[in-house]
Image (cartoon, helix red, strand yellow):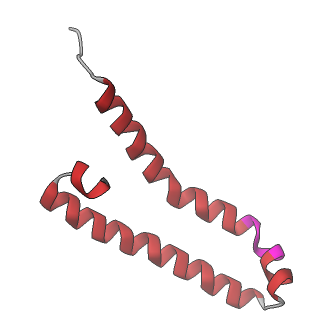
Amino acid sequence: MVLKTNKYSVAFAIILAVFSAIGPFTIDMYLASFPKIMGYFGTKASLVQASLTSCILGIAFGQIIMGALSDVHGRRKPLY
């Protein structure tokens, strides 16, 4: 059995993979920079942790919105 793929479907799969990796990648980079952020802004750890919470909430709301749009329009149109 031979699977037929075109260059657009492979590129689209790569774009979807990159979009799904952005959320965890930003959190990993953000956690490593906590001490530098506290020193640069001269703030407490709890305030930096609150900014991480808002980052996670932004990712969650983005998934909720994009999930609903992709249910209605399919995946391709909301990504464009």
Quarter assignment of residue 63: bottom left
Give the residue at x 76% y 69%: 33
Q: Residue furthest left?
A: 72
In the displayed structure, would residue 57 be above or below residue 50? above
Q: Residue furthest front?
A: 80
Mainly helix, strand or loop, the magenta region?
helix
Give the residue at x 22% y 53%: 77
Any magenta on residue 34?
yes
Quarter assignment of residue 47: bottom right
Give the residue at x 31% y 54%: 79
In the displayed structure, would residue 72 be above or below residue 12? below
Q: Is residue 50 left or right of residue 44?
A: left
Q: Is residue 68 left or right of residue 66?
A: left
Residue 9 is situated, as x and y percent measured from the top left of the image, at 29, 31
- Could you tell me which quadrant the N terminus lies in? top left
Residues in magenta? 32-36
Residue 17 is situated, as x and y percent measured from the top left of the image, at 43, 44
Front residue of 41 and 27: 41
Residue 11 is situated, as x and y percent measured from the top left of the image, at 37, 34
Any magenta on residue 67?
no
